[in-house]
Image (cartoon, helix red, strand yellow):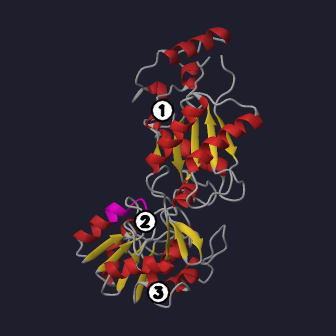
Amino acid sequence: MKLTGTQSIGIKAPIVKEGDDLAAIVTESVIDASKSSDFEIEDGDVIGVTEAVVARTQGNYATVEQLAKDVRAKFPGGEAAVLFPILSRNRFAIMLKGISMGLDKVYLILSYPGDEVGNQIITWEQIDDAGVDPYNDVMTEAEFREKFGEDTKHIWTGVDYIEYYKSLGDNIEVIFANHSRAALRFTKHILTADVHTRHRTKKTLKAAGAETVYGLDDLLSAPVDGSGFNPDYGILGANKATEDKIKLFPKDCDIFVNNVQKQMKEKTGKTVEVLVYGDGAFKDPVAGIWELADPVVSPGFTKGLLGTPNELKLKYLADNEFQNLEGDELQNALRESIKNKQDLSGKMQSQGTTPRRYVDLIGSLCDLTSGSGDKGTPIVLVKNYFDNYATE
């Protein structure tokens, strides 16, 4: 029996620039790392490449002025309610700067106690103590401060996002609400800034009488004055590059991953899978922050990563079907069960396993491995991911 399981290896790579041949850089970096660190590249290995370097080599950038021009074109009346943004210096702040430049009036509607990915302005306990009904109560900033005070700093960053967001434009008025129809009290023109609930939010607002409804996915979905763009996600998944420039989520990722797969096959003779990954999908158990601020974990992957795990729960088998077996007899019985398993959907033998897509699981593993700071490993090699207890 093979005695090692999944391994996740961060691969250091050169700092890439616009126009670089990233597929060649990834291929050479993985091969060089295998030689210097004495590991083999094998069939079934998975190469993850962070979305940031893909977008960087694509030159997929836009200025806040270009974003502002697109906003003005979509909201010619000059006003909009910007609904349910996440609280982020790296993500939404640079977007808000461009949005406010493109409008005369911004009604910035923040959800409370926090945003959709778990960043909190206040706590649920504060809401309970204040006697506020979060499902119905709509508050101005003054009313919010009266009930909850001035200390609304983020638990980790120490930033007061209310004050910070207001500082990004002198035309921004902050409102607090948790139902999308509240925006219609202020204007019939809405820009939904939520990430994962955006489709429902748009549908609800249109049904409630909104005259104009766009989302962040509709901004820079096509080039503006030569800007970068993303036809699928607009500025969703974008983040700050400089004080006046946005790096957009990469596009054409399927072309890129298939190119890397092809080059690896040509140079090593091995068939590997490849994905582009952004934020992982996991939740901080202390702060309650859900990491996934990108619209998807992986915007592009090779076809071998389609699907979800079909796994047996070993401890369930050991405690139930094979509870009277021990030692080699137990191990052999478990291995035979794995070798002969069928579709386990709905079966008790699979309870407690993880019914998520491979790309979301592996992409999350890659994100945790590469980190978000100065590790310098924008490439991750995942080995033995598809192995199991019966693998020899």
Image coords of residue 38 (percent x, y):
75, 32
Kind of residue at badge 2: Phe
Q: Is residue 139 above or below residue 15?
A: below
* Residue 123 shows up from this direction: no
Disc on the earlier residue, 3 or 2: 3
x then y, percent, for residue 136: 37, 73
Residue corresponding to mark 1: 309
* Tally of numbered discs: 3
Q: Nearer the viewer, residue 25 or 169?
A: 25
Up-down: is 151 above or below 218?
A: below
Helix, strand or loop for disc 2: loop
Q: Any magenta on residue 135?
A: no
Dot 1 or dot 2: first in sequence order is 2
Q: CA distance from mark 3 to mark 1?
A: 47 Å
Asked if the residue at tag 1 contacts the one at tag 3, i.e. Cβ–Cβ closer than 8 Å, the answer is no
Q: Amino acid at mark 1?
A: Pro
> Which residue is under mark 3?
172
Which secondary structure, mark 1? loop
Residue matched to label 2 = 229
